[in-house]
Amino acid sequence: MIKRATFGGLALPYALLLPQVVVTLVFFFWPAGQALLQSVLIEDAFGLKSSFAGLANFESIFSDANYLNSLRVTFVFTAASCSLSMTVALLLAAMADRIIRGAGAYKTLLIWPYAVAPALAGVLWGFMFNPTIGVVAYVLQALGIKWNFYVDGDQALFLVTLAAAWKQVSYNFIFFLAGLAAIPRSVIEAAAIDGAGPFKRFWTIVFPLLSPTTFFLLVLNVVHLFFDSFGIVHALTGGGPGGDTEILVFKVWSDGSRGTNLGSSAAQSVVLMAIVIALTVMQFRYIERRVHY
């Protein structure tokens, strides 16, 4: 006999839901509504006066070469960092799943980087790759590679991508490891008996069974990189050199806080939100079809 929870009235269920509803309204819908409102207004630097501008703020940002460059940088950064972090995490999870001795210590060490704050991760990578005192920079220069991400935009974007991917590997690793643990060993052993090699077993059996986990991580990684990479960029490059690492979320802050252009900053935040929503819908619309549950 299955025991089910019963409620004598509607008060308790609504009371249990109320904290989450309040948090969602206060920290999501209210700021989103404020951004939508400010995106059609022109305000002074102190926010004391405002006038209706219609779509002028949106027309301004889409005619701005710096904003279009920020769009390009964001998509390159997101695609590269997401691909790198998920690939490395899957490789490490596959290796950890096969280890017997010392597996606990190995897994714990791989999870630790996720506890590092994004700004601190940016500082750590900036210190290691500092062209004057960085250990990694010293090795690169010894190999004949001219390294100075403070003046080379491509190197700066590469370093930011690397730092963001490193920060996200641990999160992806946890879910991939859980997904691998859920795959029945009997299926893999049967394939091995039939003569399938390690690569074929992984590509035809393990990876398809991991598709729900992979899809879930793909959606979360894209959202994370669009919104939560601000700390890494701010601490590591400050959007430079010459805007080559100025991703959208950093430009929203820069134009609103540094440039005191609140209307343009709000319009950019609305566009950023629309891009993330559109990408998420596209992923559910087209990629989820290939997921095997």
Image (cartoon, rainbow, N blue to C red):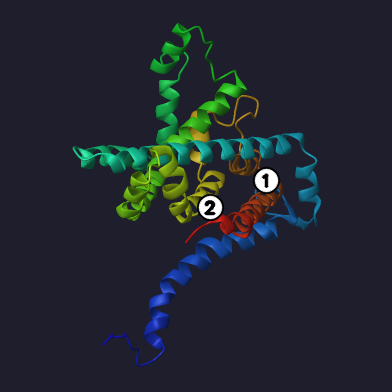
- How busy is the neighbourhood of tag 1: few (under 14 within 10 Å), some, or many (20 plus)? some
Identified at 65% across, 25% down, the residue is 242
Q: CA gap, disc 1 to disc 2?
A: 36 Å
Residue 118 lies left or right of residue 43; in this view the side is left
Callout 2 crowding tier (Cα within 10 Å): few <14, some 14–19, many ≥20: some
Q: Which of labels 1 and 2 is toward the front?
A: 2
Would residue 210 appear left or right of 244 to someone viewing this image?
A: left
Task: State which quarter of the image contains the N terminus.
Answer: bottom left
Image position of 166 (left or right of 77): left
Judge whether 242 appears above or below 221 on screen: above
At a point 58% along the width and 59% down the height, the residue shown is 31
Q: Identify which residue is drawn at 56% across, 35% down.
A: 80
* Residue 277: % across, % down: 62, 56
- Pick whichever, 214 or 165, lies toward us: 214
In the figure, 239 relative to 281: above or below?
A: above
Q: In which quarter of the image is residue 135?
A: top left
Task: Confirm whether residue 255 shows in the render.
Answer: yes
Report whether residue 113 is seen.
Answer: no
Q: In which quarter of the image is residue 280?
A: bottom right
Amino acid tagged 1 = Ala
- Find residue 96 and report its horizontal and vertical position in percent: 30, 40
Circle 2 residue: 219
For the residue pair 45 and 116, the one nearer the viewer reads as 116
Look at mark 1 in the image and give the residue it sits on: 45
